[in-house]
Image: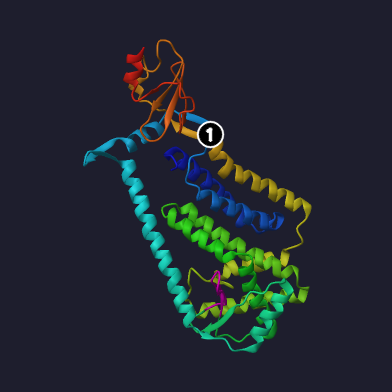
Amino acid sequence: MIRFSELVNLVFLTGAAVVLLQIIFRNNNAILWLDARLLLGCMMAMVLRLFVLADSPVSNNVPIFRVYPEICWFLRDTLFYWEGMPVSIMMLLQLLWAAGAVVSGGYRIHGYFATQRRIRCYRRLRNPEFAKTVKRINGELGRKAKFRLVVSKELSTPCIFGVFRPYIGIPEIELAPKEIYLVMKHEMLHFYRGDMIVKILCEALKAVYWWNPFVYMLSDLVAGMQEINVDFRIVRGLPEMGQLEYVDCLVKVARNRERRKHENRWEISFRKESPSEVNKRIRLMLKNQEISGRKTTASFLLSAGILCMIVVGPNILTFEPYAIHEEHVDGSVGGKGGGIYYLDNKDGTYDIYVEGQYYETTIEVFDKNVPVYDTLEEVISSD
């Protein structure tokens, strides 16, 4: 299980990276200058890193002497005993986290299966133009997945749902053959790019970190970048007139959404955003050009920097609270003979002291010949 200090580091560094990505995402020129595919890959690396709730095997601990140690001591101090077991604020917070994760996870699982039951009840779409279009797009992409096409007045936008048995839902809206092609290709690309799996991962992450607003921001950024990547993939294969037709299709679907407000978290829709966000998408598509080497290099460097913040950073740099109370510092830390010893923190970690001075905190005793003490009084009595 991850230690408190590493969890704080992970949340802090991830939050800083999310804020940076949020700033980039708000700037159309920044998105166009960088490589949207690498940015999405970087976001996914952040999502996967947050699932690893374990101590890093390698770390370089930096002791903090002010404020942070007092907070940690306050959280770890015993509040009361329950059946002989000491209970601290830290333990209560861990229980609250676990209980919240169970409730949040249960709520999201219920929502998934409720969506599945509802979409299965929609009536089959019998229009042969849609089936012919699916076959055509599968041929273009070299794929052969079978999609169940349904239609319902409950839907406000075209959407896709499902991982193994994908459904494509179409609202009751008149679409021309060219619009059918664009809508179906958009949804099918979402499926073939694994965007539904990514959505499930993001929802699972929000269930685990239900208390962390940066995780919700990261999930929204991932969803936005998925849409941008699908848009760029479609318009790159279209002539100029085809790109304008795609824009017109976006606007048409957005207008239909304004009349029907029903949305669902588990459906990946053709367009869910507000008019201002639709406008942002359109501007990006119209300005988009082929990714140059300069764009790819810049995006790679930025992605590498963010990955260092959230993957490498917590692994090699951990800010630790100084391990002893101030009143124990003078005359009680070092043994007369100096040397090296461990001090058991009773939470699965050990403080290493060298020549009487704190060196770092570790999760295991590397050298069995080095003495391990339970308290500072044992250190004094051993001298």
Would you name the residue on which mark 1 appears?
A: 59
> Which quadrant would residue 251 be assigned to in this image?
bottom right
* Magenta stretch: includes residue 28: no
Identify whether 5 is placed above or below 37.
above
Compare residues 313 and 373 and report the one nearer the observer: 373
Compare residues 17 and 366 and report the one nearer the observer: 366
Of the 4 image quadrants, the one containing the N terminus is: top left
- Please tell me how crowded label 1 is: few (under 14), some (14-19), or many (20+) other residues with Cα within 10 Å: some
Identify residue type, mark 1.
Ser
Count every numbered label the image shows and give the total.
Answer: 1
Residue beneath the point at 53% across and 31% down? 60
> Which quadrant would residue 281 be assigned to in this image?
bottom right
The answer to whether residue 370 is seen in the rendering is yes
Position of residue 274 in the picture relative to residue 188 (left or right)? left
* Magenta stretch: includes residue 167: yes
Of the 4 image quadrants, the one containing the C terminus is: top left
| First to last magenta residue range | 156-169
Percent of width and height locating residue 88: 29, 40
Residue beneath the point at 55% across and 82% down? 150
Position of residue 345 in the picture relative to residue 126 (left or right)? left
Identify whether 141 is placed above or below 44.
below
Percent of width and height locating residue 359: 48, 24
Percent of width and height locating residue 208: 43, 54
Compare residues 317 and 353 and report the one nearer the observer: 353
Residue beneath the point at 40% across and 14% down? 335
